[in-house]
Amino acid sequence: MATGKIIIVSAPSGTGKSTIIKRIIGDSDLNLSFSVSATSRSPRTGETDGVDYHFLTEEEFREGISRGDFVEYEEVYPGRLYGTLKSEVSRVVDSGRNLILDIDVCGGLNVKRLYPNALALFIMPPSVATLRTRLEQRNTDTKEAIDGRVAKAEYEMTFADSYDCRVVNDDLEKAVEQTRALIKEYISR
């Protein structure tokens, strides 16, 4: 059985990355799977260990970091860690499926360093002003939170040139098709 490939998809918040991935994940030509992330938070009602997340204690998570068990991780809040285990990457690609990682910019660059043959895609907003408008239209954040997200997005966009390919999401259908085509071309190599 052929080994699967790794596709990294990163973008600033509000750019449409998760929407694009949801639109292509079921495409049988792409043979995509997600890995199960690890977290130090407790399971919520209805969540299953190994299915929704690998639930670890903070101590277990930090021991895993020390052993080098993660391809990337982030401490989102003090004591609240999330990451991708190397064992999960191996589980998916060894099964012959292509692993798609919906991952933040710094995590994406870390994965690319560990797996230089991975395809790293960066989803760009058409402009910072458009991104701000999209975030405002969600009606989920305060003005201060939006200002913070926009500032973070501007910073994250400085890393776009470190990615293999960039897709500008100014038209969702075109962005989905461009992403699909880039992945299809990569996995056919």
Image: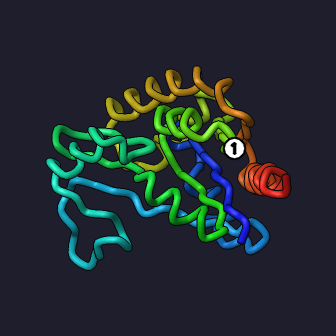
Please tell me whether mark 1 sits on a helix, a strand or a loop: strand
What percent of the width, then of the height, locates residue 142? 32, 38
Callout 1: few (<14), some (14-19), or many (20+) C-alpha neighbours within 10 Å? many
Height in image: 150 above or below 16? above
Q: Quadrant of residue 71?
A: top left
Height in image: 56 above or below 124? below
Q: Is residue 99 visible?
A: yes
Residue beneath disc 1: 119
According to the image, what is the colour scheme of the structure? rainbow
Height in image: 159 above or below 72? above
What percent of the width, then of the height, locates residue 159? 59, 24
Q: Nearer the viewer, residue 77 or 30?
A: 30
Q: Is residue 133 visible?
A: no
Taking 54 as reference, is 138 left or right?
right
- Screen quadrant of the N terminus: bottom right
Taking 178 as reference, is 72 left or right?
left
Name the residue at 44% across, 23% down.
Answer: 151
Q: What kind of residue is marked 1?
A: Leu
Name the residue at 52% across, 43% down.
Answer: 14
Height in image: 51 above or below 66? below
Q: Nearer the viewer, residue 149 or 140?
A: 149
Name the residue at 56% across, 32% down.
Answer: 113
Q: Nearer the viewer, residue 155 or 141?
A: 155
Count of number-bearing discs: 1
